[in-house]
Every structure is written in structure tokens, then in C-alpha cells.
Image: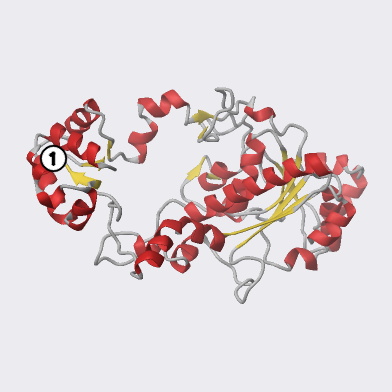
Amino acid sequence: MLDNLLRGVRVLDLTQNVAGPFCTQILGDFGAEVIKVERPGGGDDTRLWTPPDICGHSSTFMALNRNKQSLCVDLSKPEGADIVGRLAAEADVLVHSMKPGSAENRGLGPDALCEANPRLIYCAISAFGEIGPLAQLPGYDPLMQAFTGIMSVTGNEGDDPVRVSVSLIDMGTGMWAALGILAAYISRLQTGRGLRVNASLLETGMSWMTIFIAGYLASGRSPRKLGSAMSMAAPYQLFRSSDGYVFIAAGNDRLFVKVCDALGCPALVADPRFAANSDRVVNRAALQTEIEARTMKTTSADIVAALRAVGAPCSELNTVEQAINHEQVAALGMVADLSMPGVPGLKTVPLPLRVNGERAGALQPPPLLGEHTDAILDRLGLDVQERRNLRQAGVVA
């Protein structure tokens, strides 16, 4: 069901690295035909991001490029840009992550392509946005974590700034771009005309900081680093156990009572330092000491069992290995098999949603570099000799 929602929609993908490929992989999981345009010689930069690798293939590339075809074209050559222009004339969606102005310099800007194909949904993903004094600068996820202040609130107070290890800005930008494309597609169904969609790493990073920005505007104080804790609620953080850590999330006074009952410290509820959430936030350090006096004598498993028995939100701290092998993750099917010749046992993390109870089922492996070049050029009407000439000229591969 899910992988039929965009059946018949053709997407031209001129992106690389993480944000753009994640966007187009989402569209491919919904059933769109995605043609990934890569430069001859190396292709998407992430093809070379190793280690780790899976049978010689970059695990990063493999994670972001399923359900796509690979077309190797040199866009710096007029003949290569012409091929992409011809494909864009037949496409429903074009997504690129070139610096602002680069697509226009190749004749692949929105004005030219949307004039030739008014139904085209044209999506540009950039680092700092399409306008402004920094628009021409390159950018990556951790750079934007620094720029937007995410690093300033990540980690423990007194320690050096650290990045969030998950590429949340890159992948978030891909999600926002996909959301914009889908909204534009709905509009096109009504009007018959495509729209232009713009997303950037900077705008995504600022949107992820919404709550912190609101807190600063309300108080005039820059947010502090709180480690695993949250500034608005307590207890709402990791606590040490006898063999690891447990996250306890008491988001209201009722849950705090349940936590105290489960941990065998009901007297904390009557302690004036912890009477209300606002008191607990002010006295967070003292509350942590009181709770850890109990949790450090007990295993994580026993703490989690006791808290869940009374309905208090909690979780053991899992490693990646423990998370992917957990029975709940297995029940949801969040680690799926992906068949690929020469890569036995390949697995992938599927789209994290279901439609009518079903996940995308027809997952295709990431393409080899230039695997579909001939088939796509043949569809454009180029015969064997024309394709041979283009290869000899280094236009395609």
C-alpha cells in the first residue's frame, strides 16, 4: 500500500551526501521512480565515506539510497546538462543540492526548467538558504549544529561543546524537503502547475531550536547544557543504576508520585523541595542525588520493571546493538532485509510509518554507480552509437 502512493511519479535526484538523498529515498519508499544523477568517476561523495563498509560498499551510501536508479552524467559539460534538462522535461519532481546559482549556470535553474515543464515541482536544498549574505557558503550538519546553537546546549555543563551524533539537521532537512514536495504535489493535482520548494540546513537547525529560542525570548537567559536532562521538567533524565543507566521521565506531578512509589521513596513527594515540578526543576541536583541513592543499588532491568508496573515512563540505556535486537523493534519491523547481489544479509531501516497497517514492501537495493545509465539514455531515444560517443567524451559513464 505505502509503496504505491507515488506510483508513476518520476523524481530527478541531483543531490548527494545526506539531506537530499534522504529526501528522495523517502519519495522512493512511497513508490516514486527516482533517477539519481551522479558524476562520473566517483558519484555521490558518500560512496567513499568508509569505513564502515558492507562488502566494499559504504554503509552510509547504502542507508540513504535504496529505491533509486543511478545515471552517471557530467553536468559540467553542456551535453550532460542537456541530458538532465531533457529528463526534467518529463519529470514530476527535480531535487538538487547545488550551491545557489550553480544550477542556473548550467541551464538547470527553475525558470528554464519550469518554463519547459510547467508541471515540474522544483526543490532546491542548500546550506545557508537561497538568499542572504552567507547564501553561497557550503555547509554540513555539524557545522550547522554549531551555527544554530545546537552544540551550545548539547552535553554536560562545564564540558566542551559536542555535536549530536545523529545527523538530525541533514535528515531533518530531507524530511522538510519531502514534506514540501508532497504539499506541492497535492497543489499540482488541484492546479495542474508545479511549485518551487526550498529547504536549507540552517532553517532546519533553527526550527529544531524552537523551544530553546522561546525559552530565551521569555527569560532573556541563554539555555544551559543539562546533559541528559530537560530544563522544563524533573525528574526527566538518565539516572545511574548498579549496572548502567535508566532514563526516567516524570513529566507531571502524578507521574512523580508513581516514580517515588516504584523506587520505594514516597517521602520525596512530601519534601517541599520537590512538591511541584517547578520546585523539582530548581532543585534538580538534589533530586538526582536522592533518586540515585535508590537506583544505584538496583539493576537497570529491575528499575525499568518496577517503573513500568506503575505506568511511569522509563527506558534502559541501550546500545545500538541492543536497540536493533529488542523485541519491540522486531515487532514493528524497523530492521528489514534488503536483497542485493554480492551483499549477503544486507539490512535497512525502513520508512518509520505505516499506511493501513502496512510498511513499504518492495524495497530495492541502492544502485551501483551508473548501473542504469544505458537504460535511461535509451528511454531518451539515444542509440548505441550516440551513447558510445557520449562515453568517449566523458559525458556519461
| x 87%, y 40%: residue | 378
Left or right side of 134 for 98 = right
Left or right side of 230 for 138 = right
| x 74%, y 43%: residue | 185
Describe the element under mark 1 as helix, strand or loop.
helix
Q: Mark 1 points at which residue?
A: 295
* Residue 339 x, y percent position in the rendering: 58, 28
| x 28%, y 35%: residue | 313
The one of 153 and 364 positioned closer to us in this rendering: 153
Q: In this view, does 43 lie above or below 7?
A: below
Which residue is at the far bottom?
133
* Residue 187 x, y percent position in the rendering: 75, 44
Res 59 visible: yes
The one of 128 and 41 positioned closer to us in this rendering: 128
* Residue 89 x, y percent position in the rendering: 86, 49
Q: In this view, does 325 lie above or below 132?
A: above
| x 36%, y 25%: residue | 327
Instruction: Residue type at mark 1: give it.
Output: Thr
Q: Which quadrant of the rendered structure holds the N terminus?
A: top right
Q: Across the whole image, how many numbered discs are drawn on residues?
A: 1
Q: Quadrant of residue 311?
A: top left
Q: Mark 1: give few (<14), some (14-19) or many (20+) Cα within 10 Å.
A: many
The one of 11 and 385 positioned closer to us in this rendering: 11
Q: In which quarter of the image is residue 163?
A: bottom left
Res 108 visible: no
